[in-house]
Structure formats: structure tokens, C-alpha cells
Image (cartoon, rainbow, N blue to C red):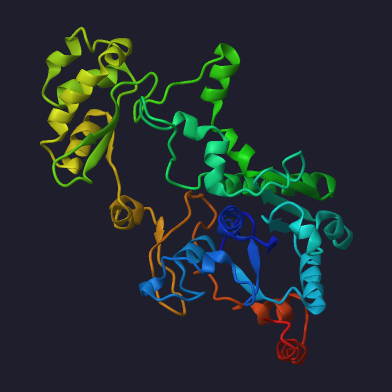
Amino acid sequence: MARRPLGGIRVTDFTWAWAGPYCTLQMAHMGAEVIRIESEKRPCVTRLIPPFADNEPGPNRAGYFNQYSQGKKSLQLDLARPEASEIVKKLISKSDIVVQNFSTGAINRMGFGYDTLKELKPDIIMISICGYGQTGPERHYMGYGPASVPLAGISSLTGYPGVGPAEIGMSYGDPNAGIFGSFAAMAALAYRHRTGKGIHVDLALWEALLVLMPEGIMDYVMNQTQPERDGNRDRWMAPHGCFKCKGDAEKWVTIVCGSDAEWQVLCQAIGQPELAMDKRFTDAAARKANEDALEELITAWTSERDRWEVTEVLQKAGVAAYPSQSNKDLATNPHLEERGYLVQKEHPEFGKRIHAGIPWQMSGSPCEVQAAAPQRGQHTDYVLQEILGYSGDEVQKLRDEQVLT
């Protein structure tokens, strides 16, 4: 079988919440051996929050944990014990990458800061993710993903005219930081390959999300203004929005025309070719100036039709359109199923469940989730014996002394 892109790379994973686990998830998807450091005494918060499989709470049944820990291994230790710290140091000495997303300074207090790690393994790569970064006057501020959205100015551009800033409904900073962390890890591996040197990557959720704000920042820098909040509309394109379809309150379809040519074919597709010649809608500037009337006309057409009918008619004509999807819609979407994105791996406690899979495919290299998320401590014996060389008797002694809890 062809080797996966990160086959042979080992990652020691100190992560929790979303940003860190999402970072190491990408590495696991690419074939790295990701070993989570866990504890029964201080369980990861993602093992404790719903939804739970079959609505039965349990540390191995949490959907949050099981989604973002696919393909990883779990080593359970009591890090308050010096013997456990020694085990972790031995594992790090046999690892290529260490990832952590505690608050600034926490990993140093645990005895696993970068200066310590590079003494153990000079070419180690460390990825540190936190709200404000490892340096700067606000480095010790507490930070979570939801707060990073307004912090990055996204809320100031999100919402409807005449209404204040709005939340976007998700902790956007976390997955964005996770993706950037995995990208930085790939760059660090390339750097190490060239130079033989390790590196410490300092990644802030704030900055990882701020990169998505070029329009707002540039508008201020160049004009001392910022874009107005405008709901689902776009600054340049029209129509651009979400339109009500036939059925209950949840049935909507998004429609976007990126050019005059796309607007003209939309008019043909909805059986109103005369709209293309209407002076109110002949070009993008005119459509923007008359957007309320434009949206009323489109809604009059969509509201009498099923959302999938609208999608098929417009897509056939070459217009970007697709229904607004619920979680149920996504979990049963035939396109995602055929592409293999929706995965079901056997879990020893609750069987198979649908999970979001790998968002890319590679020719010549396997691209498949390797296993369901681990049960807590599932791979403790494997790590100690197969990787670190402990005997069975030594592992049992550590277990009897409650080091492995």
C-alpha cells in the first residue's frame, strides 16, 4: 500500500478543547501517529460535553471528542507523578512534533516547555496555540474561540443594517487556528529536513482569525471607514442571498450571481427573460441599487418551489445555488456519501456512527480515516511497551502504583 504523507511521523499531543485537537486531527488524517496525553483525574473537557452516543453520558461516548480524535491513540497518565513525567519525556524523545494549546506558561509549569524539549530532542518541533500568543503584553489574557470572533473584528461586519454587531454562531477561531497549526507543522518538517534543526511555532487564535478580515482592515487603512453590515448580501454581487422556498420555516436556498452573464441565464431559467433587459437590473451596479425589488422577484419564484427543484433548475443553467443544509441534511447527503467524506468506523463502546471525514483526496496516497477515536487510555500498554520498551511487569507495576490513571 502507498505510504500516507506523514507516515512515520509521531506526534505527542497535549491538546484539549477544539483548536489543538483539530490541529492534530489533520496530522492523523495524513498518517502521523498521534498520541494523546490523557488523565482520568483531569479528563479532557471534550470527553465531558454533549452530544453523547444514545444520550448516555460517558468519557468515551462524547461526539465532540470522537469527531476530533479520529485516528489517534490515547496514553493515560497522572502527570502529577514524577514517574509519569519521565514517561512523557521518553515519548517526546521518540517524537517528531509536540502540540499543546494551554494558556501561555502552563506547559512550562508542567515541565514540558520548548526549552526543556529541545534538550531532550534538539530537532523537536513544537506547536503552541493559545488565544493571544506566547509573547506580547496580552499574552497572559484568557482566550477562547468564541471570543476570538469579535476580537478579530468579524462581528463588527456581521449582522443586518441598522442592527449591532452579531455573532456568527460558532467558535471560528478554533478550527482556523488548528488548520494553521497543522500547516505550520508541515513547514517546520520541511525546515527540519533541510537544516536538521527543530523549531517552536507560536500561534495565536486572534491572529489566525484576523487573516480573514482583509476587506475591513484595508477599508479602514485606505479610507478610514469600514464596510457596512448588510446581512446575507455582498458588497458587489447581486443577487447574493438566502431565499425562502416552499415548505416549513427551515427550507431556504442560497443563490449567487457573480456576473451579468449569470444574471441573464438566471432570468431565462426562472422563465422571466425580460428581467435581463429591465433597466433596474441590467448590470451589477443597477441590481445593487434596486436589491430590495430584485430579492422580492426572486423570492416570489423560489417560494413556490421545493429547494431542490430550485437548485437543479439554476445549477443546470450555470447559476450557483444550493439549499441551506441542516445537520440531518449533511449526514444523509448523497454527494458527500459518494465521495467517502461521511465515515463510520467501529467504536468498541457504541458501534458505528457517522462522522465528518477528510476534506481532501490524494491520488497515489491513501486518504481514509484510519480508526474511530480512542477510548481513554486505550493505547497505554502499546505506547509503553512497543514504543518505549517497558516490560509487561514494569507496566503492571506502574498501573498498581496508579501512575497510569
Outermost residue toward the top? 279
Tell whether 251 sits left or right of 72.
left
Tell whether 27 sits left or right of 367.
right
Residue 71 in view in this figure: no
Q: Is residue 280 above or below residue 57?
A: above
Look at the image and tell me in which quarter the C terminus lies: bottom right
**Where is residue 191 drawn, in percent x and y?**
77, 44
Tell whether 106 sits left or right of 330.
right
Count the marks.
0
Q: Nearer the viewer, residue 389 or 92?
A: 92
Q: Is residue 254 above or below residue 340?
A: above
Choose top left, top right, bottom left or bottom right for residue 138: top right
Residue 76 in view in this figure: yes
**Where is residue 99 drawn, in percent x and y?**
69, 57
Q: Nearer the viewer, residue 76 or 271?
A: 76
Choose top left, top right, bottom left or bottom right for residue 243: top left
Q: Residue at x 80, y 61 (%)?
A: 109
Q: Residue at x 71, y 51 (%)?
A: 128
Q: Residue at x 81, y 79 (%)?
A: 83
**Where is residue 78 drawn, in percent x and y?**
71, 77
**Where is residue 323 drawn, in percent x and y?**
26, 42
Outermost residue toward the right? 119
Look at the image and tell me in which quarter the N terminus lies: bottom right
